[in-house]
Amino acid sequence: MLQQLQQADGSREAADAAFALMASIYPICRSITGDGVRRTLDVVEQVVPLTRTEVPSGTPVYDWEIPHEWNIRDAFVADASGRRIVDFRAHNLHVVNYSAPVDRTMSLDELQPHLHSLPERPDWIPYRTTYYRETWGFCLRHRDREALGPGPYRVVVDSTLAPGSLTLAEAVVEGSTDGEAIVYTHGCHPSLANDNLTGIAVAAALARALRTERPRLTWRFVFGPGTIGSLAWLSRNEHRLARLRAGLTIGLLGDAGPLRYKHSRRGDTVTDRVTAHVIGREPFAGLLTPFEPYGYDERQFCSPGFDLPVGRITRSPNGTYPEYHTSADDLSLVRPEKLAESIRALARTIALLDANRRLLNLSPKGEPRLGKRGLYGSVGGAGPGEFEHALLWVLSLADGAHDLLAMSERSGLAFELLDRAAGALEEAKLVRVL
Ligand code: ZN
C-alpha cells in the first residue's frame, strides 16, 4: 500500500506537489477561525476532496468554548506623514493574530506595550497570537523598532471579532473493516512554512494517494486549528473513538532536523510500536521520544479522558529551531529532500499501521500441508525459500497474541513479506484475521 510514495522517485514527485501547494497558500493570513482558513481549504480541495464542518462561536467544547470568528482586512502603524512604518500588507505576521479592531493616534510610549520584536534576531518578525484575550498588537523587526521616533503614530487594525464559526475539514478514505485511524494536522498559522504548511501539504498528499487504494482502516485526515480544533473534533466524534485503532498528529516536516516520533501517553499502543519500528530504523534512523503533556494536538487525543493511541511525527518540533514562529520560517527553510523523506516515512508508517493485524491459525495441530494448497515448493530437499519461511512463521505465531509487527520482530523477516504470506494463508483459509 502507498508503494509509490515509499519510493524515492514517488516521494520526490509528491514533495514537489506539496511544495507547490505550500507556495500557493503561504501568503494567506490564517488563524484559528475565519476566511483565511476557508480560502486555504479551497486550495487543498484541489488536491483532495474535503468534508467541512462549521462549529458556531459559543459552542462549548469540554472546558473551552469556540471563540468569536476573526477576520482581518488591513492593519498598520503610520507616522505623521502617513507613511506606513509597520504594514500588514507587507507581511501578515506584522499584526498580532486575533487582534481586536483599533483606530487611534498615540505616542511611541503608549504604543510600546503593544509591540513585539526579537532583540536577538533583529531582522526577523516574531509570530504572536491573542486568541483568548481581547487586545491588539504589532510584531516588527527589532531593527525597525529601535529606529522609531517619539510619534505620534496612527494605529489601525481593521479586523472583526464577531460571532461566526470555526472550520474543520476532513479527507476521509473508507476502509474495508470497521476500524478507523486519524491523521491530524494544525492549519491555523499565517505565513509560516515549516510550521504549519508542511503538515497541511503532506496530509493532503497522503490522503490523495490513499484514495487510490483500498485500506483496511477508514483513514480520516483532519485539518483544523491547534488545540481548539482537535477539541472540537473530539467533541463531535466521541461515538467513533472506540473504533480508533491508530492515530498521528503531524507537522513541521520540512526542516533539516531528523525525523522524530513522540509516543502516545500509553507508550505501548500499536501506533507506538509500528511508528517506532519505521521511524527509529534505517533508512530513517529518526529519534524516538517519550510522551510529555506539552506539544501539539496529541495533548488532547492523549488526555486521560480519551487516552487514544495517538503519537506525533515531526522533524524539529516546537521551539527547537531558531526560525520557529518567526518570519524566517518561510519557504526557503523547507528542504525538498527532507519533505520527501517525511512523505516516505509517513507513507510506510500508514501502510504498516493499516496492514498490521492479529491472526488465528485455523489448523494449529501440526503443520498444515502447504504443498497441496500450492503454497510450498513440491520438490523436497532444498529447504524453504524466503516466502515459505514467512508462511511457517505466520502459522507458528498466528495464536491471536502476535500481530504482524510482533511476527516481524521475532522472526527478523520484513513486515511486507509476512503481510504477503499472511494474505496467502488467509486466502487458503488456514488463518483468519481477529
Ligand atoms: Zn506553531
Image (tube, rainbow, N blue to C red):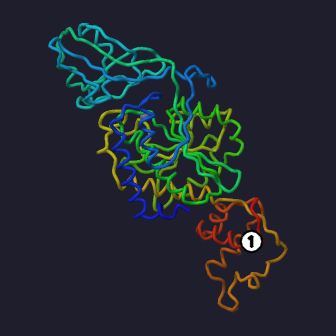
Image-quarter location of ligand 1: top left
Q: How many marks?
A: 1
Q: Position of residue 383 (x, y in %)?
A: 66, 86
Q: Is residue 427 left or right of residue 153?
A: right
Residue farthest to the right, as pictured: 365
Q: Amino acid at mark 1?
A: Leu
Say which of 325 and 264 sits in front. Answer: 325
Q: Position of residue 29 (x, y in %)?
A: 37, 31
Q: Is residue 390 left or right of residue 201?
A: right
80 above or below 375? above
Q: Quadrant of the C terminus?
A: bottom right
Could you say whether the residue bearing mark 1 is in a helix, strand or loop?
helix
Q: Is residue 144 visible?
A: yes
Task: Please tell me how crowded label 1 is: few (under 14), some (14-19), or many (20+) other residues with Cα within 10 Å.
Answer: many
Q: Position of residue 423 (x, y in %)?
A: 68, 69
Residue at position x 36%, y 34% in the image: 28
Q: Is residue 289 visible?
A: no
Say which of 369 and 92 sits in front. Answer: 92
Q: Is residue 359 left or right of residue 167?
A: right
Quarter occupied by residue 16: bottom left
411 above or below 347? below
Residue farthest to the left, as pictured: 81
Residue at position x 66%, y 63% in the image: 404
Q: Quadrant of the N terminus?
A: bottom right
Say which of 123 and 339 sits in front. Answer: 339
367 above or below 164? below
Quarter occupied by residue 44: top left
Q: Position of residue 341 (x, y in %)?
A: 42, 56
State the residue position of label 1. 395
Does the numbered disc 1 mark a residue whose Cβ is under 8 Å from ligand 1?
Answer: no
Quarter occupied by residue 198: top left
Residue at position x 41%, y 24% in the image: 71
